[in-house]
Amino acid sequence: MTTTFTKKTLGLETTEPALTPPPAIDKVAPFNKKPKLGASKARKRDIPEGLWTKCPKCATMVFDKELDENLKVCPKCYHHFPIGARERIHSLVETCTFEEMDATMVSVDVLNFTGVASYTTKLEDYQKSTGLKDAVVTGICMIGKHRAALGVMDFSFLGGSMGSVVGEKLTRLIERATEKALPLIIISTSGGARMYEGMFSLMQMAKTCAALGYHAKARLPYISVLTHPTTAGVMASYASVGDLILAEPGAMIGFAGPRVIKDTTQAELPPGFQTAEFLLDHGLIDAIIPRNELKERLIQYLGYLTASQHLRAAV
């Protein structure tokens, strides 16, 4: 039987025959209706990547802008993330006072090293990815009211390894500091000598230390700052002979790795071995300074170390 629905029953303007009644309109949504799964996925896709960084020590997600403003130090556990040479220089020197030295000096593959990739290819790749010519940036700058010679290594360039260019740039920096009677600051981070250059890389240990010997003979101060990691040939040469040796919290400092030392000595290593805190307790370094306090402390140390020099100049 055909049912006729009128505007009286449906509230419509016309009368039409229908086989089935129209669906009922619920004014209240059912309480057991599940949300669509696609909505949450869409929201996740809307969040751009590269805005947050997970701290490897405390697993806290840190907003990248906050991390940059805090000089790449975790605001919760104070873990010190790696930092580039340019960024570190910017955090230490007065604005527009850094005069870079030997900016165009580049390494040459004198041994014609071959392997999975040639040494020349590796150099070109790292120069493009880091924007640096090699693993150290050197120059003359102002830190506070003190004019100083500053060298900063960058671990992102071939592990901060010391080759002929790194050794030559540092030696020239030291010699310039001696010539101009300037205090010297070198901030180290390195995996050691650059084995792509064989014996030429090892010669840089003696060359840099010889230049530091003349600098010390002139009674000029040298401050060495050790960051994570500072190891092998760099630690065995110029990084460990400063008048003041400073370090960042938690930095790994040593010559060979813990596994190599353990296998060689056949002895259990003490807890915290090769950390900045362990070496401070045993007298190798003089102070551990957080990154955001380094500039202020360097100004204090430079004032103290150059006081006698200013007195001699006044007389």
Image (cartoon, rainbow, N blue to C red):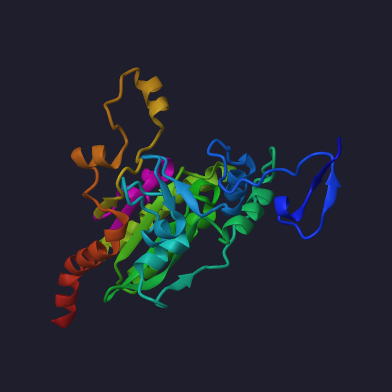
Q: Position of residue 31 (x, y in %)?
A: 53, 39
Q: Of all residues shown, which one is farthest toward the bottom?
A: 314
Q: Would residue 123 be found to the left or right of residue 242 on screen?
A: right
Residue occupying the point 75% across, 55% down: 7
Residue occupying the point 42% across, 78% down: 96
Query: Can residue 104 be seen at all in this image of the molecule?
Result: yes
Quarter of the picture holding the C terminus:
bottom left
Q: Position of residue 292 (x, y in %)?
A: 30, 59
Residue 263 appears in which quarter of the rendering? Answer: top left
Residue in front for this viewpoint, 58 or 223 = 58
Residue 70 appears in which quarter of the rendering? Answer: bottom left
Query: Can residue 219 be seen at all in this image of the molecule?
Result: no
Q: Which span is picked out in magenta?
A: 223-243
Residue in front for this viewpoint, 120 or 292 = 292
Query: Height in image: 218 above or below 250?
Result: below
Q: Position of residue 299 (x, y in %)?
A: 24, 67
Q: Would residue 10 be found to the left or right of residue 205 on screen?
A: right
Q: Of all residues shown, which one is farthest toward the top?
A: 266
Quarter of the picture holding the N terminus:
top right
Q: Position of residue 77 (x, y in %)?
A: 31, 45
Query: Height in image: 79 above or below 100?
Result: above
Residue in front for this viewpoint, 71 or 122 = 71
